[in-house]
Image (cartoon, grey):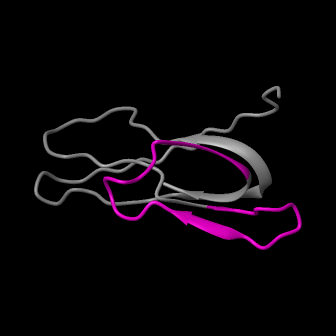
């Protein structure tokens, strides 16, 4: 199947040395077969850095109800997913 479109979403966050930073982004789309990836562009500073795809929503059948796939707490988040009829991705 050819790639018919590509969309990148950027999420910026900054925290102080003692404060840190926690944040997320949810992207909602019309049901589509997708691949999604979460990654870092630039990291500055020491300490542990978390990133990944925590959750996505999809339809098992074209006219079915949406179901959730949740990866729980870090470090079990996925870095890349590929799924059919996805309607939402949370990173």
Q: Residue furthest front?
A: 60
Q: Which quadrant holds residue 40?
A: top left
Whether residue 13 sits left or right of residue 17 in the image: it is right
Give the x, y percent position of residue 5. Answer: 77, 34
Whether residue 81 sits left or right of residue 2 in the image: it is left
**Up-down: is 83 above or below 25?**
above
Can you say which quadrant of the picture contains the N terminus? top right
Helix, strand or loop for the magenta stretch, by majority: loop
Picture mark count: 0
Q: Give 76 or 13, whichever is nearer the viewer.
A: 76
65 falls in the magenta region: yes
Which residues are drawn in magenta?
57-84
**Up-down: is 29 above or below 66?**
above
**Up-down: is 34 above or below 4?**
below
Residue visible at 42% across and 48% down in the picture:
52
Residue visible at 19% across and 46% down in the picture:
48
Give the x, y percent position of residue 7. Answer: 67, 38
Give the x, y percent position of residue 57. Answer: 64, 63
């Amino acid at each position: 199947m050819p790639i018919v479109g590509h969309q990148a979403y950027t999420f910026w966050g900054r925290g102080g040395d003692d404060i840190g930073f926690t944040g997320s982004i949810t992207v909602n789309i019309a049901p589509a077969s997708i691949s999604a990836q979460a990654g870092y562009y630039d990291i500055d500073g020491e300490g542990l850095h978390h990133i990944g795809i925590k959750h996505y929503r999809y339809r098992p059948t074209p006219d079915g109800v949406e179901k959730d796939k949740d990866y729980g707490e870090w470090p079990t988040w996925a870095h890349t997913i590929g799924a059919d009829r996805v309607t939402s991705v949370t990173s």
